[in-house]
Every structure is written in structure tokens, then in C-alpha cells.
Image (tube, rainbow, N blue to C red):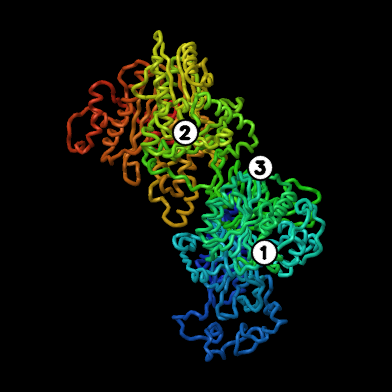
Amino acid sequence: MTKDLTSKMHLKQKLFLHKLQDDGSVMDHLSAFKEIVADLESMEVKYDEEDLGLILLCSLPSSYANFRDTILYSRDTLTLKEVYDALHAKEKMKKMVPSEGSNSQAEGLVVRGRQQEKNTNNKSRDKSSSIYRGRSKSRGRYKSCKYCKRDGHDISECWKLQDKDKRTRKYIPKGKKEEEGKAAVVTDEKSDAELLVAYAGCAQTSDQWILDTACTYHMCPNRDWFATYEAVQGGTVLMGDDTPCEVAGIGTVQIKMFDGCIRTLLDVRHIPNLKRSLISLCTLDRKGYKYSGGDGILKVTKGSLVVMKADIKYANLYHLRGTTILGNVAAVSDSLSNSDATNLWHMRLGHMSEIGLAELSKRGLLDGQSIGKLKFCEHCIFGKHKRVKFNTSTHTTEGILDYVHSDLWGPARKTSFGGARYMMTIVDDYSRKVWPYFLKHKYQAFDVFKEWKTMVERQTERKVKILRTDNGMELCSKIFKSYCKSEGIVRHYTVPHTPQQNGVAERMNRTIISKARCMLSNASLPKQFWAEAVSTACYLINRSPSYAIDKKTPIEVWSGSPANYSDLRVFGCTAYAHVDNGKLEPRVIKCIFLGYLSGVKGYKLWCPETKKVVISRNVVFHESIMLHDKPSTNVPVESQEKVSVQVEHLISSGHAPEKEDVAINQDAPVIEDSDSSIVQQSPKRSIAKDRPKRNTKPPRRYIEEANIVAYALSVAEEIEGNAEPSTYSDAIVSDDCNRWITAMHDEMESLEKNHSWELEKLPKEKKPIRCKWIFKRKEGMSPSDEARYKARLVAKGYSQIPGIDFNDVFSPVVKHSSIRTLLSIVAMHDYELEQMDVKTAFLHGELEEDIYMEQPEGFVVPGKENLVCRLKKSLYGLKQSPRQWYKRFDSFMLSQKFRRSNYDSCVYLKVVDGSAIYLLLYVDDMLIAAKDKSEIAKLKAQLSSEFEMKDLGAAKKILGMEITRERHSGKLYLSQKCYIEKVLHRFNMHDAKLVSTLLAAHFRLSSDLCPQSAYDIEYMSRVPYSSAVSSLMYAMVCSRPDLSHALSVVSRYMANPGKEHWKAVQWIFRYLRGTSSACLQFGRSSDGLVGYVDSDFAGDLDRRRSLTGYVFTVGGCAVSWKASLQATVALSTTEAEYMAISEACKEVIWLRGLYTELCGVTSCINIFCDSQSAICLTKDQMFHERTKHIDLRYHFIRGVIAEGDVKVCKISTHDNPVDMMTKPVPATKFELCSSLVGVTV
């Protein structure tokens, strides 16, 4: 046993002391190491593979330091075999690299420029080193060519290599193998002395990019990486051993960088025999880019923007962080027959005629495709069949805009998704270029023409001279004629009922509609897509040859440049758009190709599943498959390849087909619909607004934190809306037209019953205001309840003049704190709680001014079209209507012996036989509570006798807050689950990862994070920050006190948010997704009104102001809360807590008065604070050095406490629930604080 231990110790000592000398043999060293390991294994001594690998690395001399670092830093784990293989490879490299170089030449990048760097230690130069000197003729005799073995020139000047046959031959020097890794020397005809040498240590072509400071140009060996490509001849590449290779072509390559942005490398040389793809830092430097390295990372910047990053991975080379995007592949394979290719281009070009296809093919514009005989196309028969040909007349124009034709087509039987029913076309006679515009009403034609005229005259610097139209009233109105006369435009008209005289415009309309019909038929799309098809048809017509302009294309005549057909695809074909979903989610969504957008380098797609329009630059097309595929598709499926396309990103704001939401990338933008090119359509509302709009920012009056809640309420109304028609025309052609028409008739009956107006002649000194219909689809109180369709006639009160049409406009509404206080009393005493709604509430207000209004659209009295309505009662939309309604309702309630609260003007109560009955009013919604249900029934009867009411029964929902009761347990719950889920869907956060706390501690938000660069400002302009914060704010105001601190922080930066601020908002969304069902829980607890207050000293990183937070509970459930910055900077924690107590005291005075009115309780209210020094300060009447600077307005609390109305008590910090409203807290503390104020999940 002793002998065995001695042997083991001897072998282990031999293993650890075994070292390789600098001049020793690596192979012998490895053999000896293997023998020692084998001996140890025979004695059953086993080491971990990683330990043996590390021991072997430690046995190497200091000259192997670079090798050792490369091995250790290029992997996470290590095995002995990997070290063996690496040492074997290094040993082979040493034999390949000339001995005069560095020992680590094979691992790194060796660079040689125009001249060899001077050796300061050795001034003599031998013959071999002089090869790499400059072009001095005196040194030409030292040159030697390795190809022809002659002196006087080098291999780049060898005349034998200039021979055509030998130039294409691959030269392999003697003793070298093609598979060995090579260094590449690039020469160019323009700069044959510019050299780059890069070692590539593997035989196979790598898919990595190397950043090189000595490379003359960007170079790439992969042909399929090129997005654009042009074959060239004459360029030469010299490998490190002077092996010549050719530059096969030049083009562009797209790379998705570390930040997800796709950037394009220009003038990339295609060198098939190169083993590494190289990015020339010299080229980037010439273009204004800067690069710097440090800590193993190389950064390439332009201005303040980092555009590239590279890491040192192996061989001491900088490897780019990013992936190459494959270039466009051919749309049709070589195996596709000539006839099939002809039909494919026929469909791509909107069913162009065979003659037109032949003309484009003749010019070589169809990717070299020759055009054969066009097969029979059934869709052309469906779309283009005509009766007889009109006789045509010709006239000569000398330039663009000299003669313009225009016509209006419609109405269409089907309204487009954008709500349009008419199409206006404008055709330039000289170029035959056509512009389509989609209108909802004919009267919009004049506005369209003015905008078109301004646009084309600005672009061309020419003037419209003659306009030819028919005699339609929309084109011959007095204002239209007057405008043309003032602009010097000559008008030509047709003879009435002779459309042939406007033949250019009429024929263009026929061509457009024919193409649109063909494309819709081919794609099997519904007729609602007619505007998309028409827009695409016009896009293609402008790129199609025309006999009228000698077989040129309109776009060519108009701009002087030929059209590009490489991006054309078959309208309505299946398209797969790239999306960034979760890691396990599909990477594409299946869509329908809808055409092209002006000013957007992307394709317009329609996702049938989500009913959204998608604008994408990364799309794969399957042009033989349509939405509802027909077997008779002209292009055979088996011979059709999928087409992968990438289009550069250029997106602007706008909207997609109405009724649907528009899909955006996370941080995204909406796209302008071709269906509303110039004329802005009235949008239909859904959960997310889908009309073109700027990023929502709060008006100036809402910027102050005190008023931010008002802005939140206005935004919340948009969230609650569903898809409804926006105009009378939309309503009567919508799918629910019968319901909307019924709703309008009901509204008119209410107006007539209420004697809202009288028809009179308009006095000369008066100007009538206009009106419009507003449509609202209200969801039922529960999912099983049927939705209600409401139509409301609204006056356009924005035209009213102050002092003439109205005076006072203020009208109160019930406070949310009052609603929660009443709910706490209802739960505490088990009262009955019911709800009513006033039909046409504003119509009950009496007007004190004379106001005249136009008759409602769709309800003009026959024979009295010239009369107007003199309003007797207030209408929705009038400035004074809310006030007049409130005055009427208030007078009625007072006449019924109800008492109006002194603390909330919309709270009414009456005591009958010792039992109270309460009524809360929010515009036209009412909550009624009482102990006895019969008392509620009496009040309902009284209200119904005075106003037209709707009894909604037991209260279930008010102002978006859902009310749920468990009478057996005495619980009442107030939540906003439905609203929160709508918000999550609106901002695409419904699938976000969950978090347990609201604002994590790593968020240190300040104004320093606001965008500074133009790129960041542009990026954040597309982020709906203000809208998102305001949507969250409404949830906090109503039922979620746990959101107070987080929203107080993020709302400070609504004017200029940055990316980190947006990440914080997204974090709040993630918290909400897991707590959407959280609610306030009211119970039968006997606890009265109790307050808690706290502050966060200097929590504001910008101005070092402190944060005040307070919450008041009734029966253990929160009824009032607030978290806001203090107005002045506190100099100590005591001062901050003292000012917080003062703010809470102001709230408790109001809340105590309201609570006393409702319950009759007048006891002293306790406010709990965790600062003993602040509590003492509330009782101390002395002024001293540390308190004399405090504003006098904060000292009023001392008088309140002295009167005995309020008592400030000490509470432990651990038990203070307001901690969660003033600072980030851990998850366990956050849950505790939430439960203390009645928030349950």
C-alpha cells in the first residue's frame, strides 16, 4: 500500500512539474504528457477532463501566452482533447508561416500597406524584404515574380497573368494545397499597391465578418449574400502566398446589426476564393465613421450613434456582432417555362396586355425574361369585357401640366375600408400619368384638386394651364370656377350627356376599374378592397407602356427616369411578413399582398386573422397562392418558387383600412392608407385609434401634475370606445345599418317629444351652427347582455361665440372619492345599490340664448329645406349644455326635499324616517343607495315622471368600474379588469412577461434620460408614451392605489420621454397583466375614516424635491389617495414628512366633511405617520433655526390639530401602507401594503 502511494505521489509530482521549454518540441511534450496521464489511469487515479486541460495549458511557456488566452476566452468549458487539437493545429501553422514573423502570426491579423514599416532596430534591408516597398523605379530591379520566376516585376504586374485564358485560371503555388487557410492580398486596377493580408484558419468559408484596418474594400466570398450585384472583370486578388484570385463582382450586402437595425454595405467585392468576409475600416473612415476599441470590443460610430460592434473571439480578430441577410432570390426559377413566366408577369403588372409586356421585355426591364404567347386569362374576360369602342380625338400638348383631364367615378356599391364611395382621377395629358383620390362625398373634389395642384406645381415648377372635366356639379361649382379663374386655369367642359368628349379621363377610369376587377377576381378578395385594387392599378398603369406617348411609360415621361419592376408582386397573393414574437412563436405572419405605398419602401399587407394592415420590408411571397385559392391559377404551383424580399424601412404615420387596427412594431408607427391619400377620412374608433395622428401629448393645461388626471380621463374615453361609424353616411351603409337607423329615429322621437326646436327662417344677423350624428355601441353590463346602439345628434358647438351664444359653461361631476365613499357605506351597512341612466340628458336643459342650427342630416323636412332649427332646449355639443342640464336636475332634486352636499355638488341625500337615501350624479349616470328598496323605487318613479329614464337595476358598472357584490359575505368589489385588458391589447402588452412589482429598483429615471440625439428624438416621436401613461392613470384614479408611485414617476416626463422612461411604462404594463383582476374590497368592518401618510425625501433626481403620499380608508378599504411631488424642496426628512402631513390634512378636512354628511359621524380622524420628529413639529408652536424657513401655509395643520378634528399618530415604518406609494419596495412588502388598503388580487 505504501509503495502504491509513493508511486502515485511521484506521478502526480511529475505531472505538475512537466513543462515545455521555449525551444522544445510540442509533439514530444504531448507524448510525455499522455504517458503520465496513462500511468495515473492504470493506478486508478482519475482527473476531470477540464482539470487535465488546464494542467496542460499551465505547462506551456510564456511564449504561448496568446495561445493560452485564446483557448480560455473563447469557450465556457474545456476538455483535454480540445487542448490537444489546438496544439496540433498551432504546430502545423508554425510550419506554414515564414519563420521571420512573430510566433503568433497564424492566430492574428497581419497587415501590410503600400510600404513596409521601417525597422528602427535594423536599418539594413535584404532582398526579400524589398519586395513590399513602394513603386520607386530605382528599386524595381529587386522585384521578383513568383509566377513566371523572373526578376524586375512582382506577380501583380506579371504580363502572363493578363492573358485572358490564364487570368481565369486559379494559381496554386508549388507545395501549397487549396484547402489550406490562406491570407488574402487584394489589388485593384486603380490602386494595385494597396494590399490587405488576412489569415483565415479554416478551409471552409466562414459566415462571420472580420473588421480590418488594412483592407482596401469590403470583401465577401458568398454570392447569395448580395442584395444587388453587378459582375465585373479585371480585378485581381492576391493571397498571402501570392495566389491570384479574381474579383467576380461588386454589389451591396445587408447586415442585421447588434441593435436589430439593418445596415447596407456598399461596393462590396465578391471574391469567391476568399475564406473570410472582411469589412474595411478604412472605407468606413473615408465615409465619416469613427472607430475605437477597448476591453475586447471595437465600436464603429457616426456622431453619437453606434452602428457596429465587434468582439475579439478567436485568432485575436474582431468579429462583427450581427447576421447577414440573404439577398433577393430569383422570383422565377430557370425551370419555369416561357409561357408560365409570361403569365406571372401578366398578373404582376395588373393583367397588362401582351403588347405592353412585349415592350417591357424588349427594353430588358423584366429581369431578362422573354415574353411568349399569353395564355387565356379568365380574369381579364371578367374585368375587361366591353361593348363598343369609342371614337377618339387627339390634340397636341407641349409639356406636362399643359392639359389636365379629371373625372369623378362612383358611387361604389360597396364602401371601401376607408369609408370612400367615390374615386376622383386626375390625368396629365402629356405624360398620361394618373393620380387617384378616394372620397367619401362628392363635395370633397374641390379640396382634392387644390391639394393636387399645389403638390404637382411644387414638384415640377410648372403651372396647370387647362383643366377638362364634365359638367358634374362638384366640378362646376361656383367656388371651383372662381378658384380656376383666380389661378389662371382655362376650363374646358363637355357637352351635357356626352362623356365621350372627356375621353382621356373616361377611358382612364375604365382602364383602372378593369384592372381592379381583374385583380380582385384573381385574388378572390371581397369588393371592400376595391380602393386598394384601384390604387395598385394606378401604380401599375403609371409604369405601363402607352400608345398615346409612343409606347413609353407615364412615369418615364413625367420624371425622365425608367420605372423599376424588380419589386412588383401579384396583387392578392400570399405573403409572409417577418415579425419579432416570442422565442418559441412563429417568425412570420401569413398575410395578403395589397399593393404599394407612396413614400414607403415597404409592402402593404393585410392579415386576415388579426384584421390588421401590416407594412413590412422583410416579406416572402408565394405568388401562386391567393386568399381563397382557385385551381385555375395560371402559374403552375409546382414550378413556382417562393420569393423572399427585403425592402428598406421608411414609415410615416397614417392609418390602414378603417374598422381594423393597424399592426405596428414595438416601438411603432402607423402607415398611411392609400385609400385616403390626400383627403383625410373621418376615422372609426376602436380600442386603438386607427386614424392618422401624431403621437398624443397632453395639452399645456394638463402638463401640471395636479391636472394630469383630467387628461387621463379624456384618454380613457378613447380606450372604452368600440368600432362605430363616424358619419351618417358610414352608418347607413355599415353592417349594422338597421340598428343605427333605428337608433337615429329613436333620437329624433326624443327630440320631437321634448320640443327641442322649431323650424324658422334664419334672421339676417344670425349664422346657424352645424350638427352631426355621433354613434355609440355600448356593451352590456355583463357578457350575456346585448349591446345597445345609441345615436346622438350633436351640435358643433366649437363655432359658438362667447358672450353671444353662451356665457357660463362650468358643470360639476361627482368625484371618484365620493363614489368610493358611498360604496364603503353601502358595504358597511348592507344597503341596496341600484343604477339609472337619463336618456338624452342634455335635452332637458333650458336655453337662455337664441341659437340657430341646420336641420339634421337624413332628417331634413321635405318642402322646408330652406328653414333652420331655433333651439329651445340644449343639445349635446353646445358649450352651455352640461351646465343647463345640471341646473335643471339640481332644481328638481331640491324640490324633492333632497339636500345637496356641501362637499360635492353632485351628491344628494335625504333622510326619511331615520333612514337615508343617497344619489350620485355623473352627467347622465346615477347611483342610488338606500336601506329600503321601496325608497329607491319611489325616487325612480319621481325621476321618471320628470325625465326620460332607463332603469338599469342593480349597479354593475359605472365609469368603466365594475361593481360586484357578495351579499352573503358582506363584500363589495370595485375593479377595472375589462378596461385594463383593453389597454394591454391596445399597446400590444397582453402577452408580455409578468413581473411581481411595479417599478423595479434598477429604474433611476431622470431628465438626463430624455432623448438628446436626432435619432432618439425621431424614435420616441413614434412611441405612444403620453397615451399609455394617461391610460394607466385612469386605472389608478379609479381603483388602483398600488399604481400611484410608479405613475407619479413616469408622468413627469410626458413632455419629452426617453427610451428608459418607455421601458419603465412597459414594466408597469407587465405588472398589470398579472394583476388585471385586482380590485378594492369593501366589507362590513366598523372601522371609520383613517389616514396614512409618508414621504420620500429628495426622491426627485432632477430638482431634488420630495414625494408626498397619502391614503385614506373607510372600513379598511381605500377611498382616497395621492402620490405627488412637493411644491418646494425640503431640507430634511422631518421637513418633508411635515409637508406631507399638511397635504394629507387638507384632504382629510374635505373627506371628513363628506363622510360626516353621509354617516353623521363627527369623531376625530387619526392620521398615521412614521416620523416622530414630524409629529412633534405639528404640535410645536415655536420657530427655530431648522423650521423657521418652512412656508407658513404648511403650519395651518397646527390649528386643525389644536381644534381636535385631526390627530397625528405614530406608526411603524413596516406597517405603513403608504411606503408603496412613495418608493420602490420589495415584492413581499408591496403585497403587504396593498392588502392594508384593501387591494386584493
Mark 3 residue type? Glu
**Residue assigned mark 3:** 609
**Residue assigned mark 1:** 224
In the image, taking residue 90 as reference, residue 998 lies left or right, namely: left
Specify whether residue 457 is in view.
yes
Secondary structure beneath dot 2 equals helix
Q: Earlier in the sequence, mark 3 or mark 2?
A: 3
Mark 2 residue type? Ala
- Crowdedness of circle 2 by 10 Å Cα count: few (<14), some, many (20+)? many
Mark 1 residue type? Asp
In the image, taking residue 506 as reference, residue 475 lies left or right, namely: left
Q: Which mark is residue 655?
A: none
Find residue 315 and report its image quarter: bottom right
Q: Residue at x 53, y 47 (%)?
A: 692
Secondary structure beneath dot 1 equals helix
**Residue assigned mark 2:** 1035
Q: Position of residue 609 (x, y in %)?
A: 66, 42
Which residue occupies the foreground of this view, 669 or 400? 400
- Crowdedness of circle 1 by 10 Å Cα count: few (<14), some, many (20+)? some
In the image, taking residue 497 as reference, residue 1073 lies left or right, namely: left
Contact between marks 2 and 1 (CB within 8 A): the answer is no
Which residue occupies the foreground of this view, 202 or 963? 963
Q: Earlier in the sequence, mark 2 or mark 1?
A: 1
C-alpha separation, residue under disc 3 versus residue under disc 1: 33 Å
Q: Position of residue 855 (x, y in %)?
A: 53, 35
